Image (tube, grey):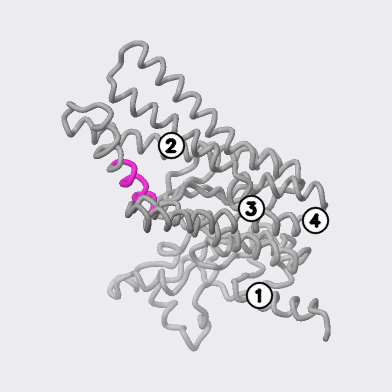
């Protein structure tokens, strides 16, 4: 899930929002302001309902972030690098650089998410009880009580033993420990995820057909998400099996054409597409020869024609911290998911800060085709 707005770093982890998070904020706000709050505590002005509902929605979003941050922090403590967190319509996604090294690490990383939501729910519940005891506004108590309930529901739902939920990862850790086979464990968790997804889709549509209530659309949507994501995770694990122990250096394009950061856009464009710069993306070099970033034709095209003679590549490039990078001895299986979620679908391969290669999804797909053909049994 790509981020639309960066929130910077929290606890050293890059955090961003996808545009679809606006949908969940709007849905929660409207549902509370037009339904639950007026029904439970009538007589307040409309602005009070809307302000309380919006506040509850924002705090709910913060609790989702806390859930994902817990995953990220525990992952780092277990030796798994975290590329970032993105909040979107159906929750949050913590992007891990690689998979957990052991079933025990998988158990800790997955289990801390529901635990965090349960603790948050308990904390909100205690706060609601205290606010009610001191005779705080009923509207405030209702908002805090809703936050307690939604976090407890989130903890319980995420603990269901079905991929891609945290419970699915707990199930995978258990199966991995029992069988010693990560791929078989992933297959079992994915199958459970698809079963749960189909159940939610069927039950959701049944509610809509039998009662005419459109609220059944929400579980159906979540069920569809479970099926597609569980299948994608299973496919990802199968790819890892084929690409196991293949270093990036074997699939990268060596010594790619580079462009100095000081080159003007006009000079750059004058040598393409039939001259030196005949590709669509290029590593950018700083004056000392180290990697500075990545520039694409699409980035250059955003600059007005009249400004291209005075604008340099360094001014329009994607800075190195925003570019996917890898070392020649990194595993392709770990790089692949990062490439699939990146904006440019490319990674710079660096050795001591210098560009030694570039990897695209096409490079990995080509290698995957050869490796699959080599491993396919003859008939």
Q: Quadrant of residue 331?
A: bottom right
Residue behind mark 3? 97
Q: Earlier in the sequence, mark 4 or mark 3?
A: 3
Q: CA distance from mark 3 to mark 2?
A: 23 Å
Specify the segment rendered in magenta.
19-29
> Where 300 sits versus 352, above or below?
below
From the top left corner, tell me how far across and down residue 276 is, in percent: 53, 83
Helix, strand or loop: magenta stretch: helix
Residue behind mark 4? 181
> Where 125 sits versus 357, above or below?
above
Q: CA distance from mark 4 to mark 2?
A: 36 Å
Q: Earlier in the sequence, mark 2 or mark 1?
A: 2
Q: Nearer the viewer, residue 194 or 5?
A: 194
Question: Would you call the spot at circle 2 few (<14 residues within 10 Å), some (14-19), or many (20 or more)?
Answer: few
Q: CA distance from mark 2 to mark 1?
A: 42 Å
> Where 149 sits versus 138, above or below?
below
In the displayed orientation, state which residue is furthest to the front. 210
Q: Which of the numbered marks, if any, corresponds to residue 62?
A: 2
Given this view, does label 4 or label 3 mark the residue nearer the observer? Answer: 4
- Would residue 364 be found to the left or right of residue 206 on screen? right
Residue behind mark 1? 253
Question: Would you call the spot at circle 1 few (<14 residues within 10 Å), some (14-19), or many (20 or more)?
Answer: some
């Amino acid at each position: 899930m790509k981020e639309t707005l960066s929130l910077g770093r929290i606890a050293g982890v890059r955090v961003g929002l996808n545009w679809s998070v606006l949908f969940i904020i709007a849905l929660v706000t409207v549902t509370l302001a037009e339904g639950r709050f007026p029904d439970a505590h009538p007589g307040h002005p409309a602005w009070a309902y809307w302000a309380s509902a919006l506040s509850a929605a924002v705090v709910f979003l913060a609790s989702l972030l806390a859930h994902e941050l817990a995953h990220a922090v525990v992952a780092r403590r277990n030796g798994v690098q975290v590329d970032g967190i993105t909040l979107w319509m159906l929750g949050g996604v913590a992007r891990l650089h690689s998979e957990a090294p052991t079933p025990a690490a998988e158990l800790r990383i997955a289990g801390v998410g529901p635990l965090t939501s349960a603790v948050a729910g308990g904390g909100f519940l205690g706060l609601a009880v205290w606010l009610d005891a001191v005779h705080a506004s009923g509207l405030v108590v209702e908002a805090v009580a809703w936050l307690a309930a939604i976090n407890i529901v989130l903890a319980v739902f995420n603990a269901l033993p079905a991929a891609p939920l945290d419970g699915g990862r707990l199930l995978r850790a258990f199966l991995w420990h029992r069988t010693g086979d990560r791929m078989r464990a992933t297959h079992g968790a994915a199958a459970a995820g698809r079963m749960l997804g189909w159940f939610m889709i069927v039950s959701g549509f049944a509610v809509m057909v039998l009662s005419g209530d459109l609220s059944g659309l929400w579980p159906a949507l979540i069920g569809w998400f479970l099926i597609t994501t569980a299948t994608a995770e299973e496919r990802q694990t199968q790819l890892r099996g084929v690409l196991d122990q293949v270093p990036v250096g074997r699939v990268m394009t060596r010594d790619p054409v580079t462009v100095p950061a000081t080159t003007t856009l006009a000079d750059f464009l004058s040598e393409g597409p039939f001259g030196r710069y005949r590709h669509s993306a290029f590593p950018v070099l700083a004056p000392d020869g180290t990697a500075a970033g990545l520039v694409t034709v699409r980035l250059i095209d955003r600059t007005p024609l009249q400004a291209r003679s005075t604008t340099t590549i360094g001014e329009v490039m994607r800075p190195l911290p925003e570019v996917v990078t890898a070392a020649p001895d990194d595993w392709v299986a770990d790089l692949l998911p990062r490439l699939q979620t990146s904006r440019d679908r490319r990674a710079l391969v660096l050795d001591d800060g210098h560009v030694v290669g570039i990897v695209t999804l096409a490079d990995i797909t080509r290698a995957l085709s050869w490796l699959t053909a080599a491993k396919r049994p003859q008939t």
